[in-house]
Amino acid sequence: MKYTIEKVATLIGARRIGDTDADIRWILTDSRSLCFPEETLFFSLTSERNDGHRYIPELYRRGVRSFVVTHLPENPSADYPDANFLKVVDTLAALQRLAERHRDEFDIPIVGITGSNGKTMVKEWLYQLLSPQMVVSRSPRSYNSQIGVPLSVWLLDEHTEVGLFEAGISKPGEMQALHDIIQPTVGVLTSLGAAHQENFRSIDEKCMEKITLFHDADVIVYNADDDTAGRCLRCSGFKGEKIGWSRENRQSAMFVESVTTEDASTLIHYIYKGTAGAYELPFIDKASVECSLACACTALTLGVDADSLARRMSGLEPVAMRLEVKEGRHGCTLINDSYNSDISSLGIALDFMNRRPDHKGRRRTLILSDICQSGMQYDILCRTVSDLAVKRGVEKFVGIGGRLASQKEMIKVDEKYFFDTVEEFVRSDVFMELHNEVILIKGARAFGFDRITELLEQKVHETILEVNLNAVVDNLNYYRSFMKPSTKIVCMVKADAYGAGAVEVAKTLQDHRVDYLAVAVADEGVTLRKNGITCNIIIMNPEMTAFKTMFDYDLEPEVYSFRLMEALIKAAEREGLTGFPVHIKLDTGMHRLGFNPETDIDEVINRLKHQNAIIPRSVFSHFVGADSDDFDTFSECQFKRFITGAERLQAAFSHKILRHISNSAGIEHFPERQLDMCRLGLGLYGVDSRDNRILSTVSTLKTTILQMRNVPKEDTVGYSRKGKLHRDSVIAAIPIGYADGLNRKLGNGRCYCIVNGKKAPYIGNICMDVAMVDVTGIDCKEGDMVEIFGANLPVTVLSDALDTIPYEVFTGVSSRVKKVYYQD
Ligand SMILES: *Cc1c(COP(=O)(O)O)cnc(C)c1O
């Protein structure tokens, strides 16, 4: 569907400046995701951290002509001759209003889903249950925020027969806007839990806020056994039909008679409005069973008959919530997305690939299955796929499935291949010849794309470090919340990003527009540059032998001594450089590296003034104890010494020299000392060094059980007979040892790992490549997953047991441990 720009202006009550005709089909809020400039309307959203108006010049250059703004650029008619500016008071409100008016065009069932857990799973399963018989539009992934919801609702089009939208809130007062945009006719309340509870006084208050979504709905589906939900619904004065499911109350709309767990499935018998039915769910965990009940009630309400429900339930596919990045064979990088293969999730995945720079000059390849999306003619669908792929720089296209093959000519990618099945593809030369490519693998599970990834993946040692890139962003935002919007940030990616992998972490940080990255040595900087990192990079320990490398790759050295400064100036002069940026370090109390801010500074200034090869870009120092209140007096003293030195340096130069002193702990503890820039390290990787609290878990080190055996009481386990057993025991061997970074001092019961949710202590000495753990009484088997540290076992438990700091545990993970990156 499209709207003229004039119509949009009316709908959002904007004043229009400019008179070029334009049709709007696409809405953009993040300039990095631009795809179809001519038909795009850009909303210049402003947040504490960012101002969308900044991206207007760039977007205009790239062909965008329609902008929603709160203020106009200085010379709109001269600088943007054929643009339209829609001027409003609040751009987010305008985006929401446009979605609201778009929603008004539809007189169809719209399902609004909210709750603390399971929203995305319910939405995706409902999609699987409904889409065989009706055309469904739904939120892509978990677009459920104040911005995500309007973008989702915008996807409703003339073919849509039912809409499924998630609404997520984190604070009181947020749901009303989402209600107005979604205007659900059917409300689904998923399970209530602790998420975001910190912003609400009670669970009832949070539940009431969520129920705001359902005010004008005809029907609400909820768990009638949940007292909070029942109580809040009564208080809310909800007038429509309540469809509750209950395992206790026969009077409920859906009475769940029995739930029987079998090996790999769950059998559920129910009575819905007086008629008995049953379905078999191909999952056994509690969360899946709860979500299936919400889905069953909703699907039956929307007119799916009991037989179809049972048939489709048995074929439900797991909901893959994340995009994974892995190293593949033959120099390939694999981006694996087995989320549904519909257009909107394809768009997001292609955008993800496109936003990750790859300067190895590798080709971008898309392997795609037939798209399961009803409602659009297949040729039109293929044309959209083709447009998206071409715009996102895909150079090689592999289509799998008969329907795609029948539309070959619609795909305008130069190099393209089509196969009926995965088997045919993996036996072909096309598969054999995949080489030095970035490959996005995207297929509905039914096509068995697992087989492709399995064959393309480098065979990994069973031990992997999983890195959650969203968590890195969450932590970045957490620390940014202590900083003024104008304060710059340096993200420390030294020591391979504290063990998490510098390249992938740096790509993510660059995408989130951090100002600087910092590494220890020049080689680390070169690796980043070779992988497409264009962000400013500081080298903290520049080696005298690597100056040329730093010049060639634009790596800005720290300068901490006269000897280093002298050599650097000589080298820069030899290369004929002028104004190469450097960062001057002052020693204010660490007594590690740096100039003395009192006694050295005049000579530093003097030397810098008598040359023009290098130029001080920043001046900085480092707190010795920002993580503890005990050193507050000392920190204050350091700060004063720093300011004195920095002021003297600044006074000697006319250009602005950035000042910075805070590390992660300092950002949080001394927000008043943030100066021009802060340096974020450990916090980015999820540990608050002030209290060892875990923020968002970034890294999870995991492995699997190799072998299990029963060992009788009095026998011993491992080298030197150290692991004496005091009872008949079950011992599991896991393929991780001190050579992988599992510190040998954790052995002999000093620490534990997590096996199926239970603590399993290390028994005996940890070996080089293998460790043994005591799993007596734990329900587990060979092949089961074992967590060494991560979401269920904070890394600080290990660092405490070792009497060290989390930094050492993170950076101790050996480079032979393969890393898998993902984002939700
Ligand atoms: C590593 C480092 C940081 C980051 O410290 P965290 O405690 O990890 O935040 C900041 N500044 C300098 C100079 C560093 O070397």
Image: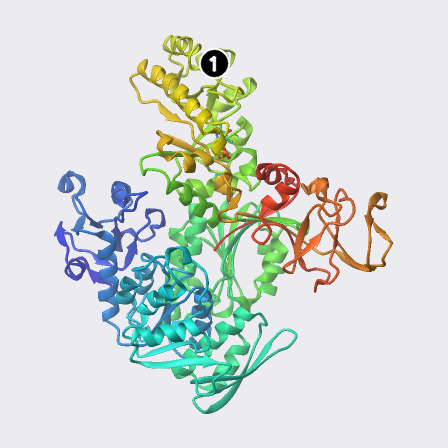
Depth order, front residue of 667/676: 667
Place of residue 730 in the rendered image (x, y in percent of width and height, measured from the top left): 78, 59
Label 1 Cα neighbours within 10 Å, binned few <14 / some 14-19 / many ≥20: many
Residue type at mark 1: give it: Met
The residue where tag 1 is placed is 565
Q: What colour scheme has been applied to the protein in the rendered image?
A: rainbow
Q: Position of 467 compared to 381: left or right?
A: right
Q: Check disc 1 and report its element: helix, strand or loop.
A: helix
Residue at (60% x, 75% y) in the render: 265
**Position above or below: 681 against 608:** below
Place of residue 478 in the rendered image (x, y in percent of width and height, measured from the top left): 41, 44
Q: Residue furthest bottom?
A: 274
Residue at (54% x, 27% y) in the render: 521
Q: Position of 253 compared to 50: left or right?
A: right
Depth order, front residue of 760/581: 760
Depth order, front residue of 521/618: 618
Q: Position of 103 compared to 263: left or right?
A: left
Place of residue 590 in the rendered image (x, y in percent of width and height, measured from the top left): 51, 22
The answer, for residue 684, to whether it is visible in the render is yes
Residue 421 placement: quadrant: bottom right
The answer, for residue 161, to whether it is visible in the render is no
**Position above or below: 532 against 306:** above
Locate the N terminus and report the quarter of the image it occupies.
bottom left
Depth order, front residue of 14/132: 14
Place of residue 14 in the rendered image (x, y in percent of width and height, measured from the top left): 15, 55
